[in-house]
Image: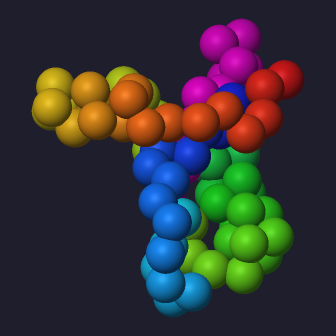
């Protein structure tokens, strides 16, 4: 899994969720358990809601360009 913070801004409210772009290992079979397990783990760690999205799910080229400009790698395995 390779999560990246999709957007990082100063002054984020404590109630705001955290957005993560995630890429799972290509040799790992798709798994809802892995996806929702990562979501639950991040929510517990951060103490706030988390939205996860995989790059292939982003169809709007403007949204994808914005994500790519603002993302920051937080973990790479």
Relative depth, front residue between 24 and 70: 70
Magenta highlight: main SS: loop
User: With 54 as the anchor, is 61 left or right in this view?
Assistant: left
Residue 33 in view of the camera: no
Residue 22 sits in quarter = top right
Relative depth, front residue between 3 and 24: 3
Which residue is at a point 47% across and 45% down the rendered structure image? Answer: 6
User: With 46 as the anchor, is 56 left or right in this view?
Assistant: left
Question: Which residue in the rendered view is the most extreme toward the bottom?
Answer: 15
Residue 53 sits in quarter = top left
Q: Is residue 2 above or below residue 13?
A: above
Relative depth, front residue between 18 and 26: 18
User: With 18 as the anchor, is 65 left or right in this view?
Assistant: left
- Magenta highlight range: 19-30
Relative depth, front residue between 26 and 53: 53
The picture places residue 23, in percent across and down from the top left corner, at 59, 28
Residue 36 in view of the camera: yes
Which residue is at a point 57% across and 86% down the rendered structure image? Answer: 14
Q: Quadrant of the N terminus?
A: top right
Tell me how many marks there are: 0
User: With 52 as the anchor, is 68 left or right in this view?
Assistant: left
Q: Is residue 70 above or below residue 23?
A: below
């Amino acid at each position: 899994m390779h999560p990246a913070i999709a957007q990082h801004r100063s002054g984020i409210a404590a109630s705001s969720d955290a957005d993560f772009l995630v890429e799972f290992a290509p040799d790992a079979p798709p798994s809802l358990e892995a996806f929702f397990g990562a979501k639950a783990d991040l929510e517990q760690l951060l103490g706030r809601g988390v939205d996860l999205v995989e790059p292939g799910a982003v169809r709007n080229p403007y949204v994808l360009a914005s994500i790519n400009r603002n993302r920051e790698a937080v973990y790479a395995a």
